[in-house]
Image (cartoon, grey):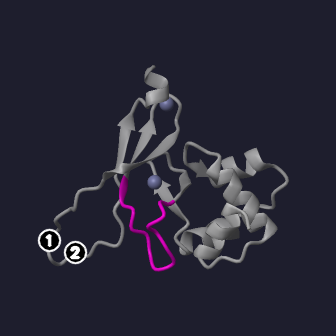
Protein backbone atom coordinates (compact mmCIF):
# COMPACT_ATOMS: atom_id res chain seq x y z
CA UNK A 1 0.00 0.00 0.00
CA UNK A 2 1.22 3.46 -0.87
CA UNK A 3 2.08 6.02 1.81
CA UNK A 4 -0.63 8.43 0.75
CA UNK A 5 -3.21 5.65 0.87
CA UNK A 6 -2.14 4.79 4.39
CA UNK A 7 -2.25 8.41 5.38
CA UNK A 8 -5.90 8.67 4.29
CA UNK A 9 -6.85 5.48 6.12
CA UNK A 10 -5.17 6.74 9.28
CA UNK A 11 -7.55 9.69 9.15
CA UNK A 12 -10.52 7.41 8.49
CA UNK A 13 -10.87 8.64 4.93
CA UNK A 14 -11.68 6.09 2.26
CA UNK A 15 -8.92 6.36 -0.37
CA UNK A 16 -10.70 7.20 -3.59
CA UNK A 17 -8.78 8.12 -6.75
CA UNK A 18 -9.71 11.79 -6.38
CA UNK A 19 -8.66 11.98 -2.73
CA UNK A 20 -5.32 10.37 -3.52
CA UNK A 21 -4.69 12.82 -6.35
CA UNK A 22 -5.49 15.80 -4.11
CA UNK A 23 -3.37 14.47 -1.24
CA UNK A 24 -0.41 13.82 -3.54
CA UNK A 25 -0.76 17.29 -4.96
CA UNK A 26 -0.73 18.83 -1.48
CA UNK A 27 2.28 16.74 -0.48
CA UNK A 28 4.21 18.32 -3.36
CA UNK A 29 3.48 21.91 -2.31
CA UNK A 30 5.75 24.02 -0.14
CA UNK A 31 3.14 26.73 0.43
CA UNK A 32 -0.51 26.72 1.46
CA UNK A 33 -3.00 26.51 -1.44
CA UNK A 34 -6.39 28.04 -2.05
CA UNK A 35 -9.14 26.01 -3.68
CA UNK A 36 -8.61 28.00 -6.85
CA UNK A 37 -4.85 27.30 -6.76
CA UNK A 38 -5.52 23.59 -6.45
CA UNK A 39 -8.15 23.67 -9.17
CA UNK A 40 -5.93 25.57 -11.62
CA UNK A 41 -2.74 23.63 -10.94
CA UNK A 42 -4.34 20.20 -10.95
CA UNK A 43 -6.53 20.84 -13.98
CA UNK A 44 -9.32 18.43 -14.94
CA UNK A 45 -11.02 18.82 -11.56
CA UNK A 46 -14.60 19.35 -10.72
CA UNK A 47 -14.84 22.21 -8.23
CA UNK A 48 -17.63 20.66 -6.20
CA UNK A 49 -15.79 17.36 -5.80
CA UNK A 50 -12.61 19.22 -4.95
CA UNK A 51 -14.42 21.30 -2.35
CA UNK A 52 -15.92 18.20 -0.76
CA UNK A 53 -12.56 16.46 -0.76
CA UNK A 54 -10.86 19.34 1.03
CA UNK A 55 -13.76 19.55 3.49
CA UNK A 56 -13.42 15.87 4.33
CA UNK A 57 -9.67 16.32 4.75
CA UNK A 58 -10.27 19.24 7.06
CA UNK A 59 -12.91 17.49 9.16
CA UNK A 60 -10.67 14.46 9.59
CA UNK A 61 -7.59 16.38 10.65
CA UNK A 62 -5.59 15.98 7.46
CA UNK A 63 -5.51 19.62 6.35
CA UNK A 64 -6.12 22.91 8.14
CA UNK A 65 -7.46 26.19 6.83
CA UNK A 66 -5.50 29.40 7.02
CA UNK A 67 -6.92 32.91 6.92
CA UNK A 68 -3.85 34.94 6.04
CA UNK A 69 -5.59 38.26 5.62
CA UNK A 70 -5.49 38.09 1.82
CA UNK A 71 -9.22 37.35 1.88
CA UNK A 72 -8.67 33.94 0.34
CA UNK A 73 -8.84 30.84 2.50
CA UNK A 74 -5.86 28.59 2.00
CA UNK A 75 -5.24 25.01 3.01
CA UNK A 76 -2.15 23.12 4.09
CA UNK A 77 -1.46 19.60 5.29
CA UNK A 78 -1.46 19.06 9.04
CA UNK A 79 1.31 17.66 11.17
CA UNK A 80 0.86 13.99 12.15
CA UNK A 81 -0.57 15.05 15.55
CA UNK A 82 -3.91 16.08 14.07
CA UNK A 83 -6.64 13.50 13.72
CA UNK A 84 -10.38 13.04 13.41
CA UNK A 85 -10.84 14.36 16.95
CA UNK A 86 -9.28 17.67 16.20
CA UNK A 87 -6.41 19.85 15.16
CA UNK A 88 -3.58 20.07 17.64
CA UNK A 89 -0.82 21.74 15.71
CA UNK A 90 -1.37 25.38 16.58
CA UNK A 91 1.45 27.03 14.68
CA UNK A 92 2.17 30.42 13.25
CA UNK A 93 1.60 31.08 9.56
CA UNK A 94 3.82 33.36 7.57
CA UNK A 95 2.50 35.44 4.71
CA UNK A 96 5.17 36.73 2.33
CA UNK A 97 4.40 40.18 0.99
CA UNK A 98 6.76 39.56 -1.93
CA UNK A 99 5.63 36.22 -3.41
CA UNK A 100 2.20 36.24 -1.68
CA UNK A 101 2.73 32.69 -0.50
CA UNK A 102 1.67 31.45 2.90
CA UNK A 103 3.87 29.00 4.74
CA UNK A 104 3.24 26.87 7.82
CA UNK A 105 5.82 27.38 10.55
CA UNK A 106 5.20 24.14 12.46
CA UNK A 107 8.04 24.78 14.90
CA UNK A 108 6.71 28.20 15.86
CA UNK A 109 3.81 27.64 18.22
CA UNK A 110 1.11 30.18 18.96
CA UNK A 111 1.45 31.34 22.55
CA UNK A 112 -1.61 30.85 24.71
CA UNK A 113 -3.79 33.94 24.66
CA UNK A 114 -5.37 34.92 27.98
CA UNK A 115 -8.92 36.17 27.53
CA UNK A 116 -11.50 37.51 29.97
CA UNK A 117 -13.32 34.53 31.52
CA UNK A 118 -16.56 35.30 29.73
CA UNK A 119 -14.94 34.77 26.32
CA UNK A 120 -14.57 31.32 24.87
CA UNK A 121 -11.87 30.52 22.31
CA UNK A 122 -12.94 28.36 19.39
CA UNK A 123 -10.07 28.99 17.07
CA UNK A 124 -6.80 30.88 17.15
CA UNK A 125 -4.89 32.00 14.09
CA UNK A 126 -1.68 33.94 14.06
CA UNK A 127 -0.33 35.25 10.79
CA UNK A 128 3.01 36.98 10.61
CA UNK A 129 3.69 39.05 7.50
CA UNK A 130 7.05 39.83 5.98
CA UNK A 131 9.54 38.49 3.49
CA UNK A 132 10.04 34.72 3.31
CA UNK A 133 13.39 32.95 3.13
CA UNK A 134 13.09 32.35 -0.63
CA UNK A 135 12.49 36.03 -1.33
CA UNK A 136 15.09 37.46 1.06
CA UNK A 137 17.98 35.61 -0.60
ZN1 LIG B 1 8.30 34.98 -0.58
ZN1 LIG C 1 -0.21 25.52 8.94
Image point 64% across, 75% down: which residue?
9
47 with respect to 129 (left or right): right
Residue receiving disc 2: 119
Q: Is residue 109 above or below residue 7?
A: above
Is the CB–ligand 2 distance for label 2 below 8 Å?
A: no
Taking depth in this image into account, of 2 and 90 the one nearest to the observer is 2
16 with respect to 89 (left or right): right
Badge 2 marks a residue whose secondary structure is: loop
Residue 33: in sight, yes or no? Answer: yes
Q: Is residue 58 above or below residue 36?
A: below
Taking depth in this image into account, of 1 and 111 the one nearest to the observer is 1
Q: What stretch of residues is rendered in magenta?
A: 78-91
Query: Callout 1 environment at 10 Å: few (<14), some (14 to 19), or many (20+)?
Result: few
Label 2 to label 1: alpha-carbon separation: 6 Å
49 with respect to 85 (left or right): right
Asked if labels 1 and 2 touch by Cβ distance under 8 angstroms, the answer is yes
Give x and y (percent) for residue 132: 44, 31
Image point 34% across, 73% down: which residue?
122
**Mainly helix, strand or loop, the magenta region?**
loop
Residue 36: in sight, yes or no? Answer: no
Give x and y (percent) for residue 21: 76, 58
Residue 84 disc label: none
Q: Quadrant of residue 14?
A: bottom right
Give x and y (percent) for residue 47: 76, 61
Residue 32 forms part of the magenta stretch: no
Query: Callout 2 environment at 10 Å: few (<14), some (14 to 19), or many (20+)?
Result: few
128 with respect to 102 (left or right): left
Residue receiving disc 1: 116
Image point 53% across, 31% down: which residue?
99
Badge 1 marks a residue whose secondary structure is: loop
Amino acid sequence: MKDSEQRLLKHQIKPTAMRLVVLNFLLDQSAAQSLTDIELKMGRTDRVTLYRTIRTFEENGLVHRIEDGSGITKFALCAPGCNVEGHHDLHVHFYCLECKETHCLPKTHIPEVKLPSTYKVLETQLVVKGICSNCSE
